[in-house]
Structures are given as C-alpha cells and as structure tokens.
Amino acid sequence: MKTTIDILKDAKLAEARIRGIGADTFNKALGYMAEELRLASEEICRANALDCEAAEGNISPVMIDRLRLTPERVEDMAKGILDVMELPTPIGEVLSRVERPNGLVIEKTSVPMGVVAIIYESRPNVTSDAAALAIKSGNVCILRGGKEAYRSARAIVDALTRGAVRAGLPECTVQLIDDTTRESANELMKARGYVDLLIPRGGKGLINACVMNATVPVIETGTGICHIFVDKSADLCCALDIIENAKTQRPSVCNAMEVLLVHEDIAGEFLPMLKERLVDTRAKAGLTPVEIFADAKALAIIDASRATDESFDTEFLDYKMALGIVGGVDEAIAHISEHTTHHSEAIITEDPVSMEKFTREVDSAAVYVNASTRFTDGGQFGLGCEMGISTQKMHARGPMGIAELTTYKYVIKGTGQIR
C-alpha cells in the first residue's frame, strides 16, 4: 500500500510524462476505460455490496441509495466516460490572439492544470467521472474517497487504470489514496508543489475544512440549500410537478430542493395541493412522504412540522423540506440572499417582470425559470459529466467540466524583438 506522499510524487512524474501526449491518446484511453469498466461490472458490484452491507445502520437509507451501484449504474458510468470522450478537447485552444505594433504575436493558450486532487464522500460514480474529466483535459488525477465507498472506488480505479495503461498512459495517471483517515485529507490540503488544484465534494464540514486549511488552490463546491419560489402568477399544476421532481426524484443530492417559498396570495389554494401531492398521495402509494417544516403562516393553512430558524439553513439530503410564505418576489429574493449557499434557485412564474427581476438579482451559480433545480448537473448541461458544482466566483462557477480543469499560459512569438 503506497503512502499519500508516494502517490503525490508518482503523480508529478506522471504529469511530466503526459504533457506531450496528444488528444487522440487521451480519447483512446477513455474508450478503453469505459470498456474495462463494463468488463469489471460484476466485480465492482460485488465490492459495492460489501460497502453497502458495512454502511447499513451507519448512514441513512437515502445515503445508502447514493452509495449503491447496480449493473445499470455501472453502465451509466461507462456511458458518461464515452460522453466525455466525444467532447472537443480544450488543450491547446487559442483563447485570444493579439498582434502588437512591434510585431510580437501573443496567444493566450489553454493548458491542463497539472495534478488535480478530489476529496469526496460516498458517491462511487464520482470516481469514474473525475478520472474521465481529468484525462480528457490532460491532467493527472488523485482520488481520495470516503471509507464507506472504499471497496467500490478501489475496484473502479483498478478497471480505469487498466484502460489507461492499454492506451499508453502512465499507470499513475489515475490513483486512489488507500488511507481514508483524516490524515490523508490533510496531506492533500497541504501538498504544495504536488497538487495544482484541490476539489472537495461532500458535506459542509469537508468543504469548510478544505477552504479554511488548504495551502493548495481549492475550488469550493458548496452545499446545496436550493430554493424554489412559487410566484402568484404560477401555473400551480406545473409548480407541483417541478417541486415533486426537485424534492423527491433523488433527495440525497446537492441540487435537490430544500426550501420552498410561496407567494401569500396563492398560499391558501396551493399549500393543500402541495401537502396532498408530497405527503398524502406518496404515503398512499407506499412511497416515503415528505416531512414539511413550515413557518407560522404556512402552519395556519396545513398540518406540518414546525420550522425553526435552522430549518431554512439545513441541507436535509432527505425527504424533508422547509416551507415559508413570502409577500412577493422581493421578499423571496431577500430570503434567498440571507440563506443561500449560491448553488441553484428557481422561480415558477408567468410574470415576465418577476422572471427578469429574479434572474437578475438572485446571486447563485444556476438560476432557473419554470424548471427543476435537479438539472444543475454536468451531464444535463452537456459537459459529459462533472467534477463538482462550484459555488464560488473565481475561475469556475456551476457544474465543472473539462474547461474548468484547464488554465492558460501566454505563448509569445517574435522575430528578434528586444525591449
């Protein structure tokens, strides 16, 4: 078993070796990686079954679902790699070109970051997504997953490595850190000179630890307290469909809705419809009903749990949501501004004035009109898959694909000019 520092050193050596490799080889590697993933599907699912068995009773059922792999999910991972393979390569792209009066030609040129490290929790699919995006963008990848998904991640990385090596890439192009203790995470955060970019994917605690303690560049992939505001002009049936999808389609992910705000003019009509759809109908169908934490105004209309101040600042990642009644679009925007994690927010409205105001004034990575927040996803945005959802403003914002794993350098061509 290699130590973290051994992995870091090997990654720097691999980075130097792949710097001159062309896009065709990277694409060939991705094709082989998808093939090896499919061939190892049974082995990966067996390893995942052990992870799920060990996690029972230690994490919630929705988080177990997040951890679980099936042959269909492994196939989706392979397809995600092939989707990335089909994207145009960003490496070597000339982003801008200026010819100066003295004849110098200055080209701003896209180049890989170098060594990209990802710290993530119990999402096995992140393993293949991150590796595919890193290789497509010419980077070396270091993966540090959580202990709940270690066996799954190890089986996935072994398959991906076989594919990369078949294409002629160094074995250390994609590496998994075997140490799942806090110490290995700290080593990555402090790995100046080895790690060019660190991306944490997980809960608030992990992200804050990286942002506060890392001495290497970090992209903050924030928690997702995603809001939906139902305006008084909204089509209420459309609103119910969007809300049910955003809350229940997969509640354990960061783009699921956590807070619903409803215009006071329609609350009396809409909230009973909401409770019927999310609570009563689901319970009758044998589905998990949504627990609603409602403010005082909403409690006067429907029977629900009482919201606390913390309810509106909680990423539930479960069949739970906070509900508040607001006086209009201005109050909705003010509430979101106070509680947002700058991830994804939506307005459901037929009023172009409210629509324009909401999209202009809400400061989040993704702002929706009449659509579910569940679309904040690299695959849904046409990026193939994603490295994470950046909630910061520098360098990258929103779903991170291959372009966000590049930087640039200036290439200056002259004919003997001196200053």
Image (cartoon, helix red, strand yellow):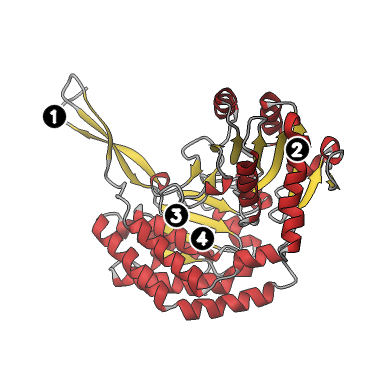
Amino acid carrying mark 2 in the image: Glu
How far is the residue under mark 2 from the one under mark 3? Answer: 40 Å
Q: Position of residue 54 (x, y in %)?
A: 68, 76
Lower sequence index among marks 2 and 3: 2
**The quarter of the displayed image where residue 364 is located:** top right
For badge 3, the amino acid type reads Cys
Instruction: Measure the alpha-carbon separation of dots 2 and 1.
Output: 76 Å
Q: Say which of 309 and 249 sits in front.
A: 249
The circle drawn on residue 269 is 2
Q: Residue at x 62, y 74 (%)?
A: 51
Callout in the foreground (1, 4)? 4
Mark 3–mark 4 CB contact (< 8 Å): no
Instruction: Tell me the tag on residue 385.
Output: 3
The residue shown at (56%, 38%) is 370
Look at the image and tell me whether residue 147 can be seen.
no
User: In the rendered structure, which disc, 3 or 4, sits on the residue that comes first in sequence?
Assistant: 4
The front one of 137 and 183 is: 137
Residue at the disc numbered 1 = 416
Pick whichever of labels 2 and 1 is earlier in the sequence: 2
Report crowding for label 4: few under 14, some 14 to 19, many 20 or more residues within 10 A (C-alpha): many
Q: Quadrant of residue 367?
A: top right
Which amino acid type is marked by label 4?
Val
Q: CA distance from mark 1 to mark 4?
A: 49 Å
